[in-house]
Image (cartoon, rainbow, N blue to C red):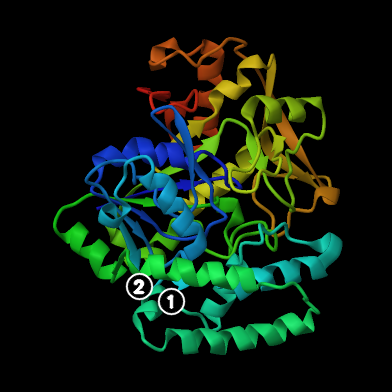
Amino acid sequence: MVDVILGLQWGDEGKGKIVDFFAKDYSVVARFQGGPNAGHTLYVNGQKIVLHQIPSGIFHPGIKNLIGNGVVLDAVTLKRECASVAALGVDVKKNLFISERAHLILPTHRALDKAAELSKGEQKIGSTLKGIGPTYMDKTGRNGLRVGDLLDKNFTTQYIKLRLKHQRLLDNHNFQEDISAWETEFFEAIEFLRSLNIVNGEYFINDAISSGKRVLAEGAQGSMLDIDFGTFPFVTSSNTVSAGVCSGLGIAPQRIREVYGVTKAYCTRVGSGPFPTELNDETGETLRKIGNEFGATTGRPRRCGWIDLVALKYACMLNGVTAIVMTKADVLDAFATLEACTAYQIDGKETAQMPFQLDPAKMQPAYRSFPGWEQAITEFRNDSELPQAMQSYIQFIEEYLGVPVKFVSNGPGRDQLIERKG
């Protein structure tokens, strides 16, 4: 069977550490969507490492790690990432597998991403400029190149054909930047990619399931960035919800068992787009400082605010979440009072449903206040040690969502994850 770990907010929930923690109980860890804009931060033997495309089970010997067909792959980033992982003693050529159906991010995709974002001016989406959106556009437009195409002797001809098409689009944007260095780097990385394990991903994953092996599907970004159900148009280009596991790996829905949803004890967002509980004040700055809220991939400061239970319940419904993992609970140690958004006030009416559009000018979050616990929890290892004020905060969230909070992370370390028995 397949268990799933995915984000319930706008990404950056700390999924990498959670996948790394759970991975030891699985035979395969598989990424099912997204691209190199993901930044899953792990601490391995006290050393920080950020994974962008490689699944977070890579540091567990004997576990196979699959980059699924739903991922758009940047060969340059992957080569660099593999070098970082190999430096820590991991044999990526043994434990890493790549679906031949995964689409490739080309240098011109990055250029198109940058040109399109520049043309939007103040209406920009907040793209990481990694070429992800244009790659997914080529995928749905049936123009893209896939990893399996690398094994075709006519790959360079196919590349040139697509590059010429992209160049016409760049000319329309009057994009003048020289990307020849990007292309040199790309073709060097392509040679490295050919040396890795390129497999038929759907048979790879289903053979593992049929032989009784446990599979852990790893999501990137977060549910509120889903292309269909997120805060459109300020979203990513893939389905980040659990339905994306089926199309992103080639498995049937009945194969999915547990869905672990990861949420911070508060809320953050990177880039543009509506954020109902955002705090543009000293409290928001304190959350950012204590939580070290800066993008793992981009370094951009994250926007910070209180937990949004309306959005969280919406995400739990979409994903069929069976258990919640709450991360960064220790960031709230210093606060005397906590707030949780329980409804939105829109045009004078209160609702607990996610509207078609989140318009900050027409809505206000309705909060419920909670006393903080005002003590350090980072050294705790058992559920019984957690302060009563913290237990009350978590219990209210469980009751509101109708989903149990099974794990609470109280620090970045592998051992800083408390399983709740209640």
Please give the residue where the numbered disc 2 appears in the rendered image: 100
Between residue 390 and residue 288, name the one nearer to us.
288
Q: Position of residue 176 (x, y in %)?
A: 78, 76
300 relative to 396 in the view: left or right: right
Decide if residue 142 is in sight here: no
Q: Element under label 1?
A: loop
Q: Element under label 2?
A: loop
Q: Position of residue 95 (x, y in %)?
A: 27, 53
Decide if residue 390 is in sight here: yes
What residue is drawn where x is 44% and y is 70%? Answer: 190
What residue is drawn where x is 39% and y is 16%? Answer: 381
**Which callout, 1 or 2, points at the residue further toward the start of the chain?**
2
Please give the residue where the numbered disc 1 appears in the rendered image: 146
Q: Position of residue 138 (x, y in %)?
A: 56, 79
Q: Is residue 416 above or below residue 110?
A: above
What residue is drawn where x is 55% and y is 44%? Answer: 313
Quarter-of-image position of residue 389: top right
Contact flag, marks 1 and 2 (Cβ < 8 Å)? yes
